[in-house]
Image: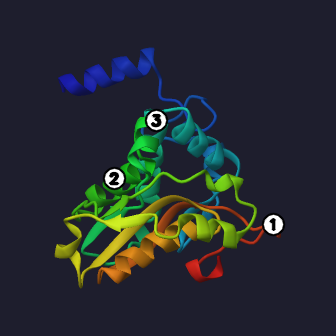
Amino acid sequence: MAMQLVRHLLDAVLPPRCLACGSIASADTDICPVCDESFLTALPLGAFVYAGPVADVITRAKYSRDLAAARGLARIFAGAVDDVFVDVDAVTFVPAHWMRALQRGFDLPAILADALASRRRRPFVQVLRASRRDASLAASSSVDERRTLVAGRFATTSTAKQWAGKRVLVIDDVHTTGATLNAALTTLQTAGIDAVPLVLAVTPAPDGAVPTALTEA
């Protein structure tokens, strides 16, 4: 009862606000109804289309060190994929190089994977590490250039062996060409892990089409 009273008092002084537009929102949701209509789904490869408010919040989380935005995205993501969650043994993520994660303050895919693992009561594990810090993929003008840039970027961690032969959900934040995710999946599959990809948001192709499977990238 005391905790409910404190929560009501805090809501009165600092009312919950929409993660995307900042307007006052319900205490039960991170997104207001107007912005929620703009969160277009891109299942089964990803939860949302990378456009509009979704893209704005992801950019803020990744490049402005906004941990509140990152955690809000994690809650939305975990709830959005409930209906398509596959039966897996564990949940992992595509990691950034430790220097990049340190610069940003956190690793968004790790926060997403942790939230989903907690909601679905699966182990949250790190079976990948970024062995080097590459240049930003944004500087690459083609799919082939991106794939060349990320080739060999990932290696498995010491805990990967215990997940060989198991099915593991691999979480990433944004899918553009699939180069990074493909490199991560290849590393896991070589280690004998049955890796299943799932991303927060999928970038539309120039013609507006949204990939719904990794092979379409």
When the figure is inspected, residue 57 is found, relative to residue 139, above or below; the finding is above
Q: Is residue 115 left or right of residue 22?
A: left
Residue under label 2 = 115
Q: Can residue 42 be seen?
A: no
Residue at figure coordinates x 30%, y 80% from the top left: 191
Residue at figure coordinates x 35%, y 23% from the top left: 8
Q: Judge by depth and name the residue closer to the eye, 52 or 174.
A: 174
Q: Amino acid at mark 1?
A: Pro
Which image quarter: residue 171?
Answer: bottom left
Residue under label 1 = 206
When the figure is inspected, residue 67 is found, relative to residue 146, above or below; the finding is above
Tag in front: 3 or 1: 3
Give the secondary structure at mark 2.
Answer: helix
Tag in front: 3 or 2: 3
Which of disc 2 and disc 3 is earlier in sequence? 3
Residue at figure coordinates x 61%, y 51% from the top left: 136
How busy is the neighbourhood of tag 1: few (under 14 within 10 Å), some, or many (20 plus)? few
Q: Is residue 147 left or right of residue 143?
A: left
When the figure is inspected, residue 32 is found, relative to residue 209, above or below; the finding is above
Q: Is residue 95 left or right of residue 177?
A: left
Q: Which quarter of the figure is the N terminus placed in?
A: top left
Residue under label 3 = 103
Give the secondary structure at mark 3.
Answer: helix
Q: CA distance from mark 1 to mark 2?
A: 32 Å
Residue at the extreme right: 207
Label ID, residue 174: none
Which image quarter: residue 118?
Answer: bottom left
Give how far across and how far down residue 87 sits, in percent.
31, 78
